[in-house]
Image: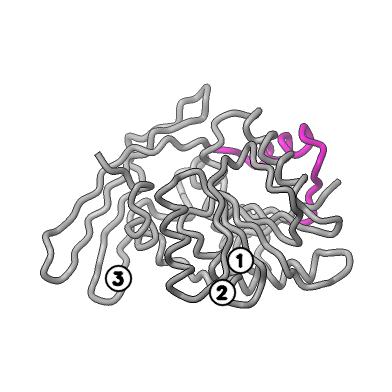
Amino acid sequence: MTGIYDDPWAYELACSFRDVSAEVDTLLEWTVRHRSSGAAARTVLELAAGPAEHAREFARRGLTATALDLHPAMCAYADRQAEDAGLELDVVQEDMTSFALGRRFDLVVTMLDSTSHLMTLDAFVAHLDRTADHLGPDGLYVLEMSHPRDRLTDDPSVSTGWTVDRGDVSATVRWGEPSDRLDPVTQIADDHVTMTITEPDAPVRVINDVVPYRFWTATELTAAVRLSGALETVAQYGDFGDVALTDAGAWRMITVLRRA
């Protein structure tokens, strides 16, 4: 059976509600704001990049961009998309807890709550350690996670179901069901994913998958950073813009870190 991460085209379609260009605008703005030198980023690494949409957008803007992901299908897709667009993109198949690229970056990013694939505190700390080793002296790490209210309240900031359209293709996505409860001990849920894709002159295609999801609270993130000791928090935001994490309109938990 093919899962959602085995079909990079479908995964990219499912996430196409995101405004990647605007998000990269903000990431570059934050880099200038929070680097002690105030210098713009010239090199960037996207971790758990999937189709590497952000890395490709950085490359489109002339930055030296690298995308890292564990899944061979995602890496092959990202490489092919970059080549087709005439972009210079280095794609690396590696684990986000153990990578060693032998070079440092002005900016490292992890988008779309990809740290939910880190199932243990040891894995999270290892990830932070490896990331710190890849930051330049004035480099920043921007980590986007889901907002804690999505799992800790009855008033989540995002919906688990949505519809996307791209040209003649449309899809309905359901990422998580009401019965997908967090295990109270491990804080892991098996999220059921259903994606229905409609294309002209083609049979309707349905992708069904179960994706393990590890929920991390804000205080657990703080604990992981302290346990690592390699990074320190510079700022936190609740959206790609000047939105506080505690703001009623916040829908993400985005943390900016630098080497300690």
Cβ–Cβ below 8 Å for labels 3 and 2? no
Q: Tell me where residue 46 sits by quadrant.
A: bottom right
**Residue 170 % position (x, y):** 25, 67
Query: Which residue in the structure is indicated by mark 1?
Result: 240
Q: Nearer the viewer, mark 1 or mark 2?
A: 2
Q: Secondary structure at mark 3?
A: strand
Relative horizontal placement of residue 162, taking residue 256 as reference (left or right): left
Disc on res. 165: 3
Residue shown at 53%/41% (left/top)?
Answer: 116
| Relative image position of residue 66 (x, y in whole percent) | 61, 59
Calculate the distance from the C-alpha at mark 1 to the C-alpha at mark 3: 23 Å
Question: Within the image, what quadrant is residue 159 found in?
Answer: bottom left
Q: CA distance from mark 1 to mark 2?
A: 8 Å
Q: Are marks 1 and 2 in contact (CB under 8 Å)?
A: yes
Contact? badges 1 and 3 (CB < 8 Å) = no
Report the Cα–Cα distance between label 3 and label 2. Answer: 19 Å
- Which one is nearer the viewer's eye here, 34 or 187? 34
Q: Quadrant of the N terminus?
A: top left
Q: How is the image coloured?
A: one colour
> In percent of the image, x 77 and y 32: which residue is there?
227
Query: In the rendered structure, which segment of residues is drawn in magenta?
Result: 215-235
Asked whether 224 falls inside the magenta stretch, the response is yes
Tell which tag, 1 or 3, sits nearer the viewer.
3
Tag 2's secondary structure? helix
How many other residues sit within 10 Å of disc 1, few (<14), some (14-19) or many (≥20)?
Answer: some
Query: Which amino acid, by three-letter code, is at mark 2?
Result: Ala
- Residue 121 in the figure: left or right of residue 133: left
According to the image, label 2 marks what residue? 22
Residue closer to the observer: 87 or 121: 87
